[in-house]
C-alpha cells in the first residue's frame, strides 16, 4: 500500500517535472512582458519533432538530440519574437490571444502537412527503458531520468536568476520594467534572451515528453490548458511558483487517475477552480 | 422592424422554404449523370489519422476500379468535420441540398453518425458508415449500411481465447465512450460465461494525456491479463506504459481488440508489441492475394503507409457503393441502392464479407492474431479464425 | 435613409413607460449602418437559398458571441468557459424535447433558464479576481460540466450524444427540414429579438455602469455603483443568452453532443468576438460570420490544411487591423474624417 503510494507520488513528480520544464518559459515571459503567448506549446512541439526526426531519419542517439531540440526551439522562438511578437507587447491581451491562437492553428496545419497526422515514434535507448527497483518499489527508469534532468535544470535556472548579472536584470525587469530601463538595463534585449531561453526549455520539454505525452500535430492545442494552469496557479513570473504548481498538478492528476479513476478528471478541474478562487494572483504571484 | 417585416417575410419564406425542400429531394438518378459521393471524415483534430486512412482508401478504390461505374462518372467529395457532430450534420445537409449527392459516407465517431442519421432518412440517401463502431448505429436509420465493424463482433473471440489459455483473471481498460463500453460489456459477458473472473475494470477519458497511472494500477492488481480497447491512434501510448512499467516481466499479458495494435502505428510500437494477442477483422498481414495487392497499392499511393482497419472499412464501403450502382444499372434511387446492398457478399482484403440483409450491418470473419516480428517489422499475424460473426454477437 | 432608420428604431425599441424621464442616450438611435446590417441578414436568406444550414449556425453562433461580448466587451470579464452556459441550454432544450415536449419557443425559455441559473450560481466565483484567474475559473467550470455530462450517460447520452431530439413545428406552422430554411428564420428572429434587448441594455445606465467597471473597478464604488451586484446581473443575463443559443443549436440540429461544453467551443467564441471587435455588440456578430464563413470556405477548398489559412487570417487581422474588424473600420473612418 505504502509502496503504491510512493510509486504514485513519484509518477506525479515526474509528470509535474515535465509540465514545469515546458511551462516555465511561458510563466517568465508572461511575468516579464505581460504577454499572453498561447503558442507556447508550439515551441515544445518544434523541439519534439526535431528530436523525433533526428532519431528516425538521421539515426542520432536520443540523448544527443536533446540539446538540438533545445537549440532549434530557441532559434524558432527568438525568430518569431523579433519579427512578430515584438509588435504586440503594447497590444491588448485579447489581441495577443487571437494572434497566438492564429500561430497555433498555422503550426498545427503546417506540421500535419510535413509530417502527417500520426503519432511520432521514439525508441528510447536501452538503459532508459524498464524499471529500477529501490526498496521493493519499481521506478520507471525513464521517469527517474526525467526527474533528474529537470532537477538539474531547475538548479541551473535558480543559480542563473540569483547569482548572475543577467538574472538580476531579469528580476529587475519583471518587478518594474520602466524603472529597470531607467537604470540602463536593456529590457528589450533581456526579454529577447529570456524568450529564447523559455522557448528552448519548452522544446527540450517537448523532446523529453514524447514518451509520456506523445507527439502529434494537435499537441499545442491538447496541452494548452495544462500549461496555462501551471502559470495561473503558480503565478506569472516566478520560477518557484511554476515549480510548485506543476508538482501539485502532476501529483493530483496521477493520484486521481490511480485511486479514483471514475472522477479523476474532475479532481484537476476542481482543484484549479478552488486554487484560483483562493489565490487569484497565483500561489506566488505579485501582480493581480 | 420586427413587426413590420415579419408577416410578409414569413409568407414569402414559407413559399421559398417549400420550394427549396422540394429541390432538396434527391431525384432519381439518371444514367450518365455523375455519381456524387459525399465523404465526411475528421481530417483535422485528434482523429485526423483515421480521416487520412479512410480517404486514402476511398481514393485508392476509385484509382483501382476506374472512376466510372455503370456509365456514371464517380465524383468523390471529401469534407472535414473535425469530429464535431453539429458540423457533421450540417455538412451532410449541405451535401444533400447543394451538391445533391447520391450517397453519404465516412463518419469517424459514433456521435457523428448518430447526429447525421435523420438526414439520411429524410433525404432518402444511403449512408455508408465506414468507421464508427458502436453496435446501435444502423438501427437509427433504414438508410444506414455499415462497412466497418462493431465492437461486440470483434471482442468475443479474444475472450474465448483467453479463457482457453489459462487466463483466469483479467483487468479491463477501455476508453470511456460508446465503442469502449460496447467492448467492455461484450468482453465481460463472454469471459465470465467461459468461467473467467474480471478483477477490475477502468474507463479512461477519450482525451487522455497519460496512461501511466491506469497501467500502474493494473500492475499492482496483478491479473493474468489486461484487456485493452482504445480508439485508433492511442495504442502507442498504452503500449509504452505497458513496457515501461514492466507488466510483461510481472507475468501480465496484453490482450484486446485490434485497435490497440493498430496497423497505422504498429511499426512505431516496435518490439514491445510482440506477443500481444488480439481478435479483429483486419490485419495488414492477412494472407490473401487480395490483401497483398491492397497493401502494396496503398503503400505505393501513400508514401509507404500501412493500411489499417479503418482504411479497409472505407475501401469496402466504396465497393458496396460501386456494386450497388452496377446492380441497379446506374439508375437506382437511394432506396434501391440500399436494397441492392442488402445481402451483398464479396471477398475483401480482410477476407469474406456479407452485409446482413435485415441489420444492414457487416457479417465477417474475425481472426485471432499475435504480434510477431516478420522481416524485422512487427505484424499482426493471424493464427485462428471464426467465420461469419454477426455484428451483434458479443 | 436616416429618417427611415429612426422610425424603425422607435418601433423596434419602444421605451418603457417611465423611461421617458431618462434622457435618451444618443447610442439608442438606430444608425443607417445597423439597418443595412439587419437587411443584409434578411437578404442573405434570399441570395443564398442553398446555404440556410450554415446560415442558421452562423446566426446561432452570433447570438452566442453577442452573449460573450456583453461580459467581455462591456464588463471586461474574460471567459474561456462560456460554453458551460451554451451547453446547459443545449442539454435543457434537447432533454425537454427527448422527453416529449418538443415545442421550440418554450424550449428556448427553458434553455434560457438553465443558462441563467448556471450563470447566477457561478457568477460569485467569477466576479472577483484577475483576468488570468477568471480565465482559469471559467475554463474549470466549463470542463467540470463537460465531465459531468460525460459521466451521466443515462441522462445525457454521454459521449455518444443525445439523439432523438424530436421538435414540433415552430409556432405550429413550420417544421425544421433538410434545407435549414426554418432554422435560419427562427434563429434570425430570436437573434434579432435578443439583440434588441442587449442593445437597449448596453445603452442604459446599467450598461454605462458596466463600462465604468471595465474602465476602472476601483472608482465605481466611489460613485455609488454596486460593482459586484452589477457584474452578477450582467453575467446572469449573458449566461441566459448563451443558454438560448445552445437551445437553438440543439433544436435546429436535433442532436446534442458533448462538444457543446468543450473548450474549443469557448476558445473559438472568444476569438470570434475579438476578431469582430469586442465591446461593440456587432463585433460578435461580424466576428462569428467572418470566422465561420472563412472556416467553411477554407475547409471546403482544403479539407486537411484549412487551419493554416484560418490561422493566417487571425494573425493578419491582429497585425493590420487592431481592435478587430469593426475597430479597423472605425479607425479608417476616423482617419478619413480627419482628412476632411
Image (spheres, grey):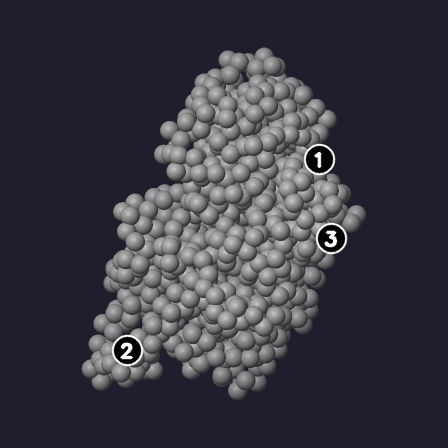
Residue sitting at 29 percent across and 71 percent down?
A194
Q: Residues under labels 3 and 2: Cα distance?
A: 55 Å
Which tag is nearer the camera, tag 1 or tag 2?
Answer: 1
Q: Is residue B319 visible?
A: yes
Q: Residues under labels 1 and 3: Cα distance?
A: 23 Å
Residue C154 - label: 3
Q: Chain of mark 2?
A: A
Q: Is residue C186 visible?
A: no
Residue sitting at 33 percent across and 71 percent down?
A153
Task: Please identify the quarter of the rendering in which residue A265 is found.
Answer: bottom right
Residue B374 - label: none
The percent position of residue A51, horizontal first and vertical second, equals: 32, 54
Q: Nearer the viewer, residue C153 or C26?
A: C153
Q: Residues under labels 1 and 2: Cα distance?
A: 64 Å
Instruction: Mark 1 and mark 3 in contact? Answer it, CB < 8 Å.
Output: no
Residue that sits furthest to the bottom in the current view: C222
The percent position of residue C244, horizontal first and vertical second, equals: 65, 56
Tell me, yes or no, whether dots 1 and 2 are on the same chain.
no
Q: Quadrant of the C terminus of chain C?
A: bottom left
Amino acid at each position: 500500500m505504502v509502496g503504491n503510494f510512493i510509486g504514485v507520488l513519484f509518477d506525479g513528480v515526474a509528470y509535474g517535472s515535465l509540465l514545469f520544464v515546458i511551462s516555465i518559459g511561458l510563466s517568465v515571459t508572461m511575468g516579464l512582458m505581460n504577454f499572453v503567448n498561447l503558442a507556447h506549446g508550439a515551441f515544445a512541439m518544434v523541439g519534439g519533432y526535431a528530436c523525433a526526426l533526428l532519431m528516425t531519419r538521421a539515426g542520432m542517439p536520443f540523448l544527443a538530440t536533446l540539446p538540438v531540440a533545445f537549440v532549434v526551439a530557441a532559434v524558432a522562438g527568438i525568430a518569431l519574437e523579433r519579427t512578430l511578437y515584438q509588435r504586440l507587447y503594447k497590444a491588448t491581451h485579447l489581441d495577443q490571444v487571437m494572434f497566438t491562437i492564429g500561430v497555433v492553428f498555422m503550426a498545427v496545419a503546417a506540421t500535419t502537412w510535413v509530417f502527417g497526422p500520426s503519432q511520432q515514434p521514439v525508441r528510447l535507448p536501452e538503459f532508459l527503458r524498464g524499471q529500477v527497483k529501490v526498496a521493493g518499489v519499481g521506478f520507471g527508469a525513464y521517469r527517474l531520468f526525467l526527474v533528474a534532468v529537470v532537477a538539474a535544470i531547475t538548479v541551473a535556472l535558480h543559480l542563473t536568476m540569483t547569482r548572475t548579472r543577467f538574472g538580476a536584470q531579469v528580476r529587475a525587469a519583471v518587478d518594474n520594467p520602466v524603472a529597470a530601463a531607467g537604470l540602463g538595463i536593456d529590457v528589450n534585449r533581456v526579454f529577447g534572451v529570456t524568450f529564447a531561453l523559455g522557448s528552448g526549455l519548452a522544446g527540450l520539454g517537448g523532446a523529453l515528453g514524447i514518451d509520456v505525452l506523445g507527439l502529434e500535430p494537435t499537441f499545442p492545442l491538447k496541452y494548452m490548458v495544462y500549461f496555462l494552469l501551471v502559470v495561473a496557479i503558480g503565478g506569472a513570473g516566478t520560477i518557484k511558483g511554476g515549480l510548485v504548481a506543476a508538482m501539485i498538478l502532476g501529483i493530483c492528476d496521477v493520484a486521481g487517475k490511480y485511486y479514483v479513476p471514475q472522477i479523476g478528471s474532475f479532481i484537476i478541474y476542481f482543484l484549479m477552480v478552488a486554487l484560483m478562487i483562493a489565490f487569484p494572483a497565483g500561489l506566488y504571484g505579485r501582480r493581480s | 422592424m420586427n413587426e413590420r417585416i415579419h408577416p410578409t417575410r414569413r409568407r414569402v419564406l414559407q413559399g421559398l422554404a417549400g420550394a427549396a425542400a422540394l429541390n432538396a429531394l434527391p431525384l432519381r438518378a439518371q444514367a450518365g449523370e455523375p455519381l456524387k459521393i459525399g465523404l465526411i471524415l475528421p481530417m483535422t483534430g485528434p482523429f485526423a489519422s483515421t480521416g487520412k486512412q479512410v480517404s486514402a482508401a476511398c481514393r485508392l478504390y476509385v484509382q483501382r476500379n476506374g472512376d466510372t461505374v455503370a456509365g456514371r462518372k464517380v465524383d468523390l467529395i471529401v469534407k472535414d468535420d473535425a469530429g464535431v457532430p453539429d458540423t457533421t450534420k450540417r455538412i451532410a445537409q449541405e451535401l444533400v441540398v447543394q451538391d445533391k449527392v447520391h450517397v453519404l459516407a465516412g463518419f469517424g465517431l459514433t456521435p457523428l453518425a448518430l447526429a447525421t442519421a435523420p438526414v439520411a432518412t429524410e433525404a432518402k440517401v444511403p449512408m455508408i458508415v465506414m468507421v464508427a463502431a458502436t453496435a446501435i448505429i444502423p438501427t437509427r436509420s433504414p438508410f444506414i449500411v455499415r462497412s466497418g465493424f462493431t465492437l461486440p463482433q470483434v471482442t468475443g473471440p479474444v475472450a474465448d481465447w483467453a479463457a482457453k489459455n489459462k487466463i483466469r483473471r483479467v483487468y479491463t481498460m477501455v476508453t470511456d465512450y460508446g465503442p469502449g463500453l460496447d467492448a467492455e460489456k461484450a468482453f465481460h459477458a463472454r469471459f465470465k460465461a467461459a468461467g473467467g473472473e474480471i478483477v477490475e475494470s477502468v474507463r479512461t477519458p477519450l482525451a487522455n494525456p497519460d496512461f501511466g497511472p491506469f497501467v500502474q494500477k493494473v500492475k499492482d492488481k496483478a491479473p493474468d491479463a489486461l484487456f485493452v480497447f482504445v480508439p485508433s491512434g492511442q495504442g502507442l501510448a498504452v503500449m509504452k506504459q505497458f513496457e515501461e512499467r514492466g507488466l510483461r516481466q510481472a507475468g501480465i499479458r496484453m490482450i484486446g481488440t485490434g485497435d490497440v495494435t493498430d496497423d497505422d502505428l504498429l511499426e512505431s510500437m516496435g518490439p514491445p508489441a510482440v506477443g500481444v494477442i488480439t481478435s479483429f477483422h483486419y490485419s495488414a498481414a492477412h494472407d490473401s492475394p487480395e490483401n497483398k495487392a491492397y497493401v502494396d497499392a496503398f503503400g505505393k499511393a501513400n508514401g509507404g503507409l500501412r493500411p489499417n482497419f479503418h482504411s479497409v472499412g472505407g475501401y469496402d464501403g466504396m465497393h458496396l457503393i460501386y456494386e450497388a450502382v452496377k446492380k441497379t444499372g446506374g439508375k437506382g434511387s437511394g432506396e434501391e441502392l440500399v436494397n441492392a446492398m442488402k445481402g451483398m457478399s464479396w471477398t475483401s482484403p480482410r477476407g469474406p464479407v456479407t452485409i446482413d440483409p435485415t441489420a444492414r450491418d457487416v457479417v465477417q470473419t474475425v481472426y485471432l492474431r499475435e504480434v510477431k516480428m516478420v522481416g524485422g517489422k512487427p505484424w499482426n499475424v493471424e493464427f485462428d479464425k471464426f467465420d461469419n460473426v454477426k455484428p451483434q454477437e458479443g | 435613409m436616416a429618417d427611415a432608420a429612426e422610425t424603425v428604431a422607435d418601433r423596434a425599441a419602444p421605451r418603457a413607460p417611465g423611461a421617458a424621464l431618462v434622457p435618451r442616450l444618443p447610442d439608442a438611435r438606430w444608425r443607417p449602418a445597423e439597418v443595412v446590417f439587419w437587411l443584409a441578414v434578411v437578404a442573405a436568406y434570399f441570395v443564398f437559398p442553398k446555404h440556410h444550414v450554415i446560415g442558421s449556425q452562423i446566426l446561432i453562433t452570433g447570438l452566442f458571441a453577442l452573449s460573450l461580448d456583453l461580459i467581455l466587451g462591456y464588463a471586461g470579464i474574460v471567459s474561456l468557459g462560456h460554453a458551460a452556459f451554451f451547453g446547459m441550454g443545449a442539454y435543457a432544450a434537447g432533454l425537454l424535447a427527448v422527453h416529449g415536449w418538443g415545442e421550440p419557443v418554450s424550449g428556448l425559455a427553458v434553455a434560457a433558464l438553465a443558462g441563467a441559473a448556471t450563470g447566477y450560481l457561478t457568477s460569485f466565483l467569477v466576479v472577483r479576481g484577475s483576468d488570468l484567474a477568471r480565465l482559469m475559473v471559467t475554463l474549470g467550470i466549463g470542463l467540470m460540466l463537460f465531465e459531468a455530462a460525460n459521466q451521466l450517460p443515462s441522462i445525457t447520452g454521454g459521449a455518444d450524444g443525445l439523439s432523438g431530439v424530436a421538435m414540433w413545428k415552430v409556432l405550429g406552422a413550420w417544421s425544421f427540414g433538410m434545407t435549414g430554411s426554418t432554422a435560419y428564420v427562427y434563429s434570425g428572429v430570436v437573434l434579432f429579438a435578443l439583440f434588441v434587448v442587449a442593445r437597449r441594455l448596453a445603452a442604459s445606465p446599467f450598461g454605462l455602469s458596466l463600462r465604468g467597471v471595465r474602465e476602472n473597478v476601483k472608482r465605481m464604488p466611489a460613485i455609488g455603483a454596486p460593482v459586484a451586484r452589477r457584474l452578477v446581473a450582467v453575467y446572469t443575463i449573458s449566461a441566459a443568452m448563451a443558454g438560448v443559443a445552445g437551445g437553438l443549436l440543439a433544436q435546429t440540429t436535433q442532436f446534442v453532443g458533448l462538444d457543446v461544453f468543450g473548450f474549443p467551443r469557448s476558445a473559438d467564441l472568444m476569438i470570434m468576438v475579438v476578431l469582430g471587435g469586442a465591446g461593440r455588440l456587432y463585433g460578435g456578430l461580424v466576428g462569428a460570420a467572418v470566422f465561420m464563413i472563412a472556416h467553411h470556405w477554407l475547409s471546403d477548398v482544403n479539407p486537411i490544411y484549412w487551419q493554416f489559412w484560418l490561422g493566417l487570417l487571425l494573425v493578419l487581422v491582429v497585425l493590420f487591423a487592431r481592435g478587430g474588424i469593426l475597430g479597423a473600420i472605425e479607425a479608417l473612418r476616423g482617419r478619413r474624417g480627419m482628412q476632411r
